[in-house]
Amino acid sequence: MGNRLIGYGSYLPEKIMTNADFEKILDTTDEWILSRTGIKQRHFAREDETVSDMATIAARRALENANLQPDDIDLIIVATTSAEMAFPSVGAMVSRDLGMTNNAPAFDVRAACTGYVYALHCARAFFNAGMHNRIMVIGAEKMSRYIDWRERSTAVLFGDGAGAMIFEHSSSNYSGIIDTVVDADGHGYGMLHESNHQSVEMNGPETYKHAVQLMPEAANYIMDHAGIQAENIDWIIPHQANLRIIESGAQRLGFPLEKIIITVDQHANTSGASGALAFAWGMDNGKIKHGQLIMYPAFGSGLTWGAAMIRV
Ligand code: ACO
């Protein structure tokens, strides 16, 4: 029982905040942010724009791309850690806002920056079990909700947005979500978590150290697990947290930078939305082509980490 990718879509809020804009409100510089993170700008949602609003736009675009109607989907999985409400799920709100009438199940997955890999992991399991025919996997985040605008060490790192992919049941085991691996170690709580003031509390250097180790480990693990050689992978879409982490990971894996999709400069870290947004960017810019093989390693709060292998 396999699956294939039949559509994708993305959404970035209109408002762009550049590093120069941050210079006006914080004791920081474009030079510091760019040299430490590779980030040039990020998109921020309007105050009245919710995670489900962004997710729904990305979902609509994915449906258009796949030439499908909302009721053609029979499961929605949303990776998000920034929903405004604990309940109902963003998935349920997306199904409402798409106007779905088929009672398709919808739920959220919460695994911070590894969320999209976890959501793909769930989708693969449902396909393997033969339980669903068409699954929409959405990553959507409003990370600006967690920004402490006085805290320069974290405020500059994040952005908002949403991306979606639609997978359909297929008899081939070599298309769509081919493989996934996911891990968690709750002892890493202190490194990166929500503070009592609902902002990001992070030990940057410790997070950095773990990210440069765990993302390449996840990449090697999934290549072994899937029986795929590095030279057969066309693109790596790493979780877009920091350009230095991406470059270091690529170097450890022996992958040339030309094979890495990089959007952190434009989007900053959009947590659970980053992989789907980077994929859409790669498609829209003619980099990723039909039939190509993509490896998507991610790392985030939890600690959580993992990787997905997708044939386009
Ligand atoms: N502008 C100017 N100076 C700053 C800024 C800023 N925006 N932020 C911090 N500094 C200062 C600090 O105050 C510190 O000054 P001090 O030496 O006088 O105390 C100095 O810069 C160095 O601070 P460090 O935190 O040691 O800087 P570092 O080189 O480690 O870079 C960074 C910080 C970019 C956060 C880095 O640690 C990093 O990328 N870590 C990983 C973060 C990450 O990717 N998190 C998310 C991944 S998981 C997920 O996605 C949820």
Image (cartoon, rainbow, N blue to C red):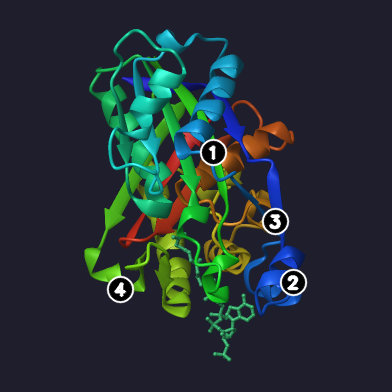
Q: Earlier in the sequence, mark 3 or mark 2?
A: 3
Q: Nearer the viewer, residue 258 or 60?
A: 60
Q: Secondary structure at mark 1?
A: loop
The x and y percentages for residue 246 are: 58, 62
The x and y percentages for residue 88 are: 29, 32
Q: Earlier in the sequence, mark 1 or mark 4?
A: 1
Provide the residue designation for mark 4. Answer: 190
**Label 3 near ligand 1 (CB < 8 Å):** no
Residue 6 badge: none
The x and y percentages for residue 128 are: 27, 25
Bin the neighbour count of mark 4 within 10 Å (Cα to Cα): few under 14, some 14-19, many 20 and up: some
Bin the neighbour count of mark 2 within 10 Å (Cα to Cα): few under 14, some 14-19, many 20 and up: some
The x and y percentages for residue 84 are: 39, 44
Q: Earlier in the sequence, mark 4 or mark 2?
A: 2
Q: Which quarter of the picture shows residue 21? A: bottom right
- Give the residue type at disc 2: Asp
Provide the residue designation for mark 1. Answer: 49
Determine the quadrant in which ligand 1 lies: bottom right
- Give the residue type at disc 1: Glu
* Residue at horizontal 38 percent and vertical 53 percent from the top: 112
> What separation in Å lies between label 1 and label 3 (alpha carbons)?
16 Å
Q: Earlier in the sequence, mark 3 or mark 4?
A: 3
> What separation in Å lies between label 1 and label 4 (alpha carbons)?
30 Å
Quadrant containing the N terminus in the rendered view: top left
Residue 17 badge: 3
> What separation in Å lies between label 3 and label 4 (alpha carbons)?
29 Å
Provide the residue designation for mark 2. Answer: 30
Direction from residue 242 to residue 265 in the image, left or right: right
Vertical arrangement, residue 98 with respect to residue 89, above or below = above
* Residue at horizontal 31 percent and vertical 15 percent from the top: 104
